[in-house]
Amino acid sequence: MAETQRVYGLHAVRALLRQEGVQVVHAWAQDSRHDPKLETLIGELQARGSRVDRTPRRELDRLAPGVRHQGILVEFQGGIAATDQDLDSFLATLTAPALLLVLDGVTDPHNLGACLRSADAAGVQAVILPKDRSVGLTPVVRKVACGAAESLPVFSVTNLARTLRTLQDAGIWIYGAAGEAEQTLYDVDLKGSVALVLGAEGGGLRRLTREHCDGLVKIPMAGTVESLNVSVATAVLLFEVVRQRWVGQGRS
């Protein structure tokens, strides 16, 4: 039997139902909550033939401990399963300049979820994570991402250095974020095909990851704080790419 996963929260469940290849195994909805958004989701689930159990909040709290489930929890199978083997064919489908996000060692689910949300907002085509140094797409990540975990291809790769070489072979420039870099993100032309690589707080990028970057960039810091949270840094870097591309197209 295929492995099941769980997702909760209104945005995340709504995005899940738009994703191809998803089979809802079971759904639980809070029996004391009857707002329109929740009722609409329940109607969509029932229209798909999915079983929806109305259950007390305390039971939902038990099934999704310590999180804000917003009265809905779904157990599902399937969806997009993106791995190393899928990456080459995915890259071949890109028709616009690539904008990819690579996260090296982000193990906090709230940080990863926030990174995915920013990536979706900035128009990132895909996110790449190492299998052995990432929290993965847990229910908490999916909830924080507000649907981005379901709308974005997320590739879980076994060898990040090899994957970066694959991106370079496809004509994508790799820029890693590092506080000690000599150039800032505002000094670099990001209008072409690029992949931005960020590491976790504290350790930053691993040595081998750094060595496979075409260049390192930093975010200029004016205060006493030495670095930003990885999810904040991700948003700053991604939207500098967006700004440069908009200006390059004559937009304002």
Image (spheres, rainbow, N blue to C red):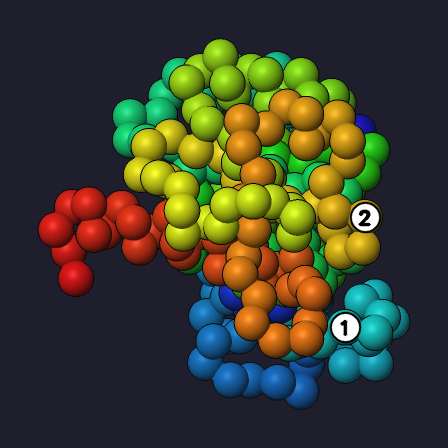
Q: Quickly name the residue at label 1.
A: 67
Label 1 close to label 2 by CB (< 8 Å): no
Q: Position of residue 22 (x, y in %)?
A: 57, 40
Q: Which quadrant of the figure contains the C terminus?
A: bottom left
In the image, residue 102 sits, relative to residue 7, either above or below, namely above
Task: For residue 200, say whether it is visible.
Answer: yes
Along the viewing direction, whichever of 222 and 189 lies nearer the viewer:
222
Q: Which quadrant of the figure contains the N terminus?
A: top right
Task: For residue 29, say whether it is visible.
Answer: no
Q: Quickly name the residue at label 2.
A: 203
Q: Position of residue 155 (x, y in %)?
A: 61, 31
Along the viewing direction, whichever of 8 and 75 lies nearer the viewer:
8
Residue that appears at 31% across and 55% down = 243
Q: Position of residue 242 (x, y in %)?
A: 34, 51
In the image, residue 170 sits, relative to residue 180, either above or below, namely above
Q: Which mark is residue 37?
A: none
In the image, residue 249 sits, relative to residue 219, either above or below, namely above
Mark 1 vs 2, N-terminal side: 1
Circle 2 packing at 10 Å, graded few (<14), some (14-19), many (20+), is few
Circle 1 packing at 10 Å, graded few (<14), some (14-19), many (20+), is some
In the image, residue 152 sits, relative to residue 8, either above or below, namely above
Task: Determine the residue located farthest toward the left in the rendered image.
Answer: 250
User: Callout 1, which amino acid?
Assistant: Val
Along the viewing direction, whichever of 153 and 246 lies nearer the viewer:
246
Residue that appears at 20% across and 52% down = 247
Task: Determine the residue located farthest toward the front in the rendered image.
Answer: 182
Is 178 left or right of 150, judged from the image as shown?
A: right
Q: Position of residue 74 (x, y in %)?
A: 67, 57
